[in-house]
Image (cartoon, coloured by chain):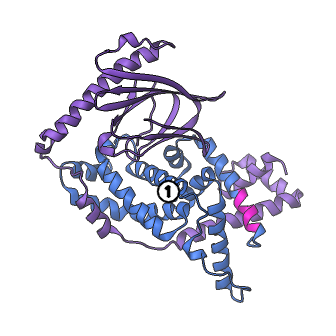
Chain colours: A purple, B blue
Amino acid sequence: MKKEHEILIQKKVDGQLSTTEEDKFDKLISQSAEANKYYNEIKKVDELLISDATRAKTIDNTHSIMNSIGKSNVQHTKTKTRLFTPRLMKYAAILIVGVFMGAAFSYTFFNSAEIDNTMLSGTMVSKTNEQVLFEDEQTKIVLHTIDVAEIKIALLRVETNELINCEITNTGHEHMQIVALKNKANLSENAEINNQLTITGNTIFQVIFNSQETPELLFVRENKIIARKKIE
Amino acid sequence: MDDDKIIIEEILKGEVSRFELLVKKYQQPVYNVIFRISGNVEDAKEITQDVFVKSYESLRNYKPDYKFFSWLYRIAINSALMHNKQNRRFVLLSENTERQPEFQSTNAEENEHKYKQLNKALIELPEKYKSVIVLKYYAALSYAQIATITGIDEKRVKSRLYDGRALLKELLAKANCI
């Protein structure tokens, strides 16, 4: 059966046909036994899905969820005193240095194909590396790693026509920061929530880690892993 | 401003107990979606709990330009798919672990058989189709809402729905269910 006929039938099942298309559909069904069979089968699948959805098991885990939230380290309160504990001040200082260095580095990285390491502070940056993690006609992923004092920065440039999912494993939320750089960056709204990012278009972003961690970056396109890289 | 956004503002001001309203409102549809993707009741309960804790902890990152449920479903879908990737194994719905009856003598048994085969077919479906089908049927979302959650355009949502449904048809036909 022609693809356009399949689409016409699928649209009919979803109640999406215009008047003209309804006429086409009626004509098709009256003339083609194959189309008639396809329509009836797709309709049965639709009905089965609808009826299965209505018999879903009821759950109520409210108590358990609220208990977990009560034990969570994150509490949304007006009290700000915790923000000034020495430990958090230390992390904040490390992250600020990281963002500053990353931004300076990305400026160079963004504006020229060749990285000029002399643009970076030689006293703080102990090591930089560039690596093409993946390249084909649709997607190119380039990684720069920077070691700075107590932190590591992974600076990534992704040029892609397809949707890319990036997962960052083996790292704690509290030590990690994901920052979209430049206006071209287009990260998904839930970056940092689940250590996962959805990337589209030409994107530059940096991920800042505690140097004691060895996180792994995993890039997935169309459900296939296209690149995997451990930051050591 | 919609109700969810008002509740979120209150939570961020320190009224943590208000989060219970969001849990009560969304835990069932979120669980339904996660269950159909993970294929296991206990895993689905655990992931659902995790999704709400994550969303609570990340509430300051929530952008009010988006509907809260879109944001929540996106976390749910990502978590369930990631769970499947991390547990690369053939999952069977716990409801499906029982042996199939050798024949169906009543309508009720026949229907139960169909549901089991449907669940099996859903598990076999590639992720890109599964997300769209689960969001349409088990969360009752529109094409536009599914597009926002999955990050693909509406045209592709429809195309994945059609292809996914056609694939389900093939799988169910093989099992003599349609």
Location of residue B73 with respect to A142 vertically, above or below: below
The stretch of residues the image draws in magenta is B166-173
Q: Is residue B4 visible?
A: yes
Q: Position of residue A131 (x, y in %)?
A: 52, 25
Which residue is tagged 1? B83
For the C terminus of chain B, the quadrant is bottom right
Q: Closest to the observer: A176 or B141?
A: A176
In the image, residue B156 lies in the stretch drawn in magenta: no
Say which residue appears at 44% left-offset and 73% top-offset.
Answer: A58
Location of residue B81 with respect to A142 vertically, above or below: below
Describe residue A151's horizontal placement relative to residue A107 as left or right.
left
Residue type of the residue flagged with mark 1: His
Q: What secondary structure is marked by label 1?
A: helix
Describe residue A165's horizontal placement relative to residue A70 as left or right.
right
Local crowd size for mark 1, using a 10 Å CA cut-off: few (<14), some (14–19), many (≥20): some
Q: Closest to the observer: A80 or A140?
A: A140
Using the image, name the chain to which the residue with label 1 belongs.
B
Q: Position of residue B25 (x, y in %)?
A: 36, 62
